[in-house]
Image (cartoon, rainbow, N blue to C red):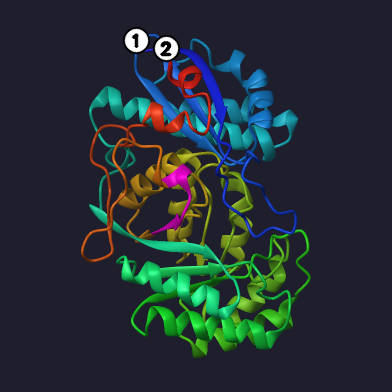
Amino acid sequence: MKIRDIRAAGLRGATPAGGWQEELTSDDVVHTLVAVHTDEGPIGIGSVFTSEALVRGALEVLRPLLIGEEATEPERVSERLHRATFWLGRGGTVTHTISGIDIALWDVLGQVTGQPVGRLLGGRYRERVRPYASLLMDRPEVLAERLGRLAAQGWTAFKIGWGPFGRVGEDLDERIVAAAREAVGPGAMLMVDAGGSDSAWSNGYKWALRTARMLDRYGVAWFEEPLGPDALDDYVHLRREAPVAISGGEVLTRRQSFHPWLEAGAFDIVQPDVTKVGGLSEQRRIGWAAQDHGVRLIPHGWNTAVGLAADLQLASALPGTDLVEYVTGSPYVDAITTEPWRLDADGMLAIPDAPGLGIRLDPEALARYTDAAALLRP
């Protein structure tokens, strides 16, 4: 089965706020779907965490390397793409785009073999996984009201991030966390994401250590991106001294970038994003390396229903990946598939067991946000 075509379509019209210094509008395209079409019919779908214009530019380079390639060999094809484009600079747009292609190729392989991708990745350790509701911070009273609504819907794990945290004052930081803990109750998981990869982030190690001690008083499960994304030595020291788990890594791409952080002991939890790190092929290898270093992989999942499906399949195939991120309120996650995601009575998500990624895009629903016909038309 050969690759016949690769197409891209950016999602616009309902892009959620990111909490970034350069804030997003609803029409900004930061999520792009990729479709790999084969000469025998199956179409694989992937997702890329970058703009449509950049994905299309990368595909101009990648398409000649892909047309006619075997569509059921995702790891070999993806590795060939990485090696053949090293001169463009490892990481960045090309790697992000390869991520979507890799996810789509795994989807094709699953469809052809009649197996869910997680089984092809090595086997299913679990049939369901706990999602954590991911939402931006706000004033304490506003955040508490949003968290209360989610808790009433059955969510049992929550991550609050970005917004004013670490950007106004330490008193406000603590009031936000206190309000969040009260809203979700003492038994719920609560995580805090400082958003240290933001372009305006200026806090350093001492702030991070003081804040980690404050978070510990509220039973926070992990402290995410408390430092800038290049502060390797500070991360190492913080992980040793902080009373809460330290997580990060969402800005890193390809497995080679993660090795120094894992070997130095910078993280308790590593968080590659499948839609930018190189796809499922790379994410799985990072998961193996993390396990060898006593680190858990919990995927960064600020993406689409396709990215969530990929994260769920990976969670089935890695023994320590027992949580996935779920961006709340995004139609790109909730409203583009034929079957909506549903929490069960325990606040868990079933991992799809249908062939491939296990989901089907709804062309009519998808058409609200992109040219679905051009993406999916045989």
Choose between 228 and 29: the one closer to the eye: 29
Choose between 34 and 256: the one closer to the eye: 34
> Is 212 above or below relative to 305?
below
Q: Residue 105 location, x and y as percent?
A: 42, 27
Helix, strand or loop at label 1? It is: loop
Position of 357 compared to 113: left or right?
A: right
Nearer to us: label 2 or label 1: 1
Q: Which mark is residue 2?
A: 2
Residue 42: quadrant of the picture: top left
Position of 302 compared to 183: left or right?
A: right
Q: Amino acid at mark 1?
A: Glu
Residue 123: quadrant of the picture: top left
Which residues make up the magenta segment? Answer: 324-333
Q: Is residue 54 magenta?
A: no
The quadrant of the image that shows the N terminus is: top left
Q: Amino acid at mark 2?
A: Lys
Mark 2 or mark 1: name the one nearer the start of the chain: 2
Which residue is under mark 1? 40
Helix, strand or loop at label 2? It is: loop
State yes or no: discs 2 and 1 in contact (Cβ < 8 Å): yes
